[in-house]
Amino acid sequence: MEEKSEKLFAEINNKSIRYAVFNLSENLNYNLLTIKNSENNGIKKGDVIDIDLASEIVSKDLKEIEKKIDKVFSNVNLIINQRDMTSTYITSFKKLNGAKVEKRDIDYILNEGKISIQKNQENNSIIHILNSNFYLDKKKRDKIPLNIFADHLGLQMTLISLPKNNIKNIKNLFENNDLKVDRLLCRPLTTGVNLVSGNSKLKNFFLLNIDDELSTISIYENMSLVFFKTFPFGTNSIFRDLSQLCSIKDDDINSILTKINFNNIDENNSKYLDEKFFKDSQFTKLTLSHIKEIIETRVEEMMNHLFNKNSNIKYFKNKLSHLYVVFENKVFQEHFDKMFSGFLGIDSHKIALRLIKLEDLSLLGAAELAFKGWHAEAVPFAQEKKSLFTGVFSRFFK
């Protein structure tokens, strides 16, 4: 069976880039052809800090990938996760005075939303526009109400933006290697798309991404991303606490914690951390229960910031039925899941908690967006080539 051309994806993380190549077959399934994780010291917290070094490493990575699948790429789709990304949830209206809804009316509302954001965020560029709900004469509509007569048309939408200079630096990194950026995709969106694409019943939920240096809480309503906020802390914050208290090098903490399952340690455990972990350093003796207490204190502080310091999150807290927690660090995937469930600041009887592994969720979601589009995405950023399949909403805006 003939297959469509391959697409290259690059997910820019804290100090690394995760690459993947997918193709789409005639039966509409996209297939993962190869994947590669690469450390890149020219990148920190998703930002380019040394363009020459970062470009040199990307060049080597691309040569390896292209050799492996015997193809030279000229385009790339980028997945980004930066603290400077912002989401703005707004409602835009247009008077129809009894006329029927046409494509130009929806186009007008979208442009009004874009103008509103650009006035208040003149240094930012919009990379996603997502719709959540339409309103006709104050009545909620789940679908695009084309050819329906009404006096007023409203649209609730989320606009995701990023500083223009950040975008220039990211694009420059790949343009230096003769790659044109097809799309910029934010990771809170790509991860959520992957979750909902295979589950039509999953409509309203929180998505919590905990990375090394950043944590992002996202809110999905009616299967659409309506809000997210990124915080400047992650699993490395916990590692640094332990490093300072135990006088252990930061680089050693991760390997030490992989040997201990903190889910099985209770508050009365008086066993000390084995001295074999500290062959090359002076350390403060701490019991395993004390180390667990240090971790729990930091986790509780993080969860309090995530769920109780933002009015949007507090508003949706009682409306959503599921919370998905995604860990970037494998130590937390395997040894800390039960610990997190006690510090999420939510009523466990009202919200179902699901702890899931990252496992390239965002890359799979990015492939879904690039190959098939998504029903809630209105205007894809820099999409000069039409995707093979697009959602109902995005088909109007080419």
Image (cartoon, grey):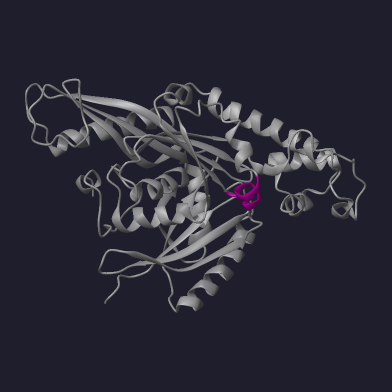
Quarter-of-image position of residue 9: bottom left
Residue 77 horizontal/vertical position (percent): 42, 57
Residue at screen point 49% across, 56% down: 360
Residue 332 painted magenta: yes
Residue at screen point 70% across, 43% down: 264
Residue 262 painted magenta: no
Q: Height in image: 344 above or below 51?
A: above
Q: Is residue 48 visible?
A: no
Residue at screen point 38% across, 47% down: 193
Residue at the far right in the pictured view: 282
- Magenta segment boundaries in residue numbering: 328-335
Please identify the quadrant where the N terminus is shown.
bottom left
Residue at screen point 67% across, 42% down: 263
Residue 304 horizontal/vertical position (percent): 60, 26
Quarter-of-image position of residue 220: top left
Which residue is at the front of the view, 120 or 312?
312
Which residue is at the front of the view, 382 or 192?
192
Residue 114 horizontal/vertical position (percent): 33, 34
Q: Is residue 266 visible?
A: yes
Report the predominant secondary structure element of the magenta stretch: helix
Residue 41 horizontal/vertical position (percent): 66, 57
Q: Is residue 292 left or right of residue 29?
A: right
Q: How many marks?
A: 0
Which residue is at the front of the view, 383 or 79?
79
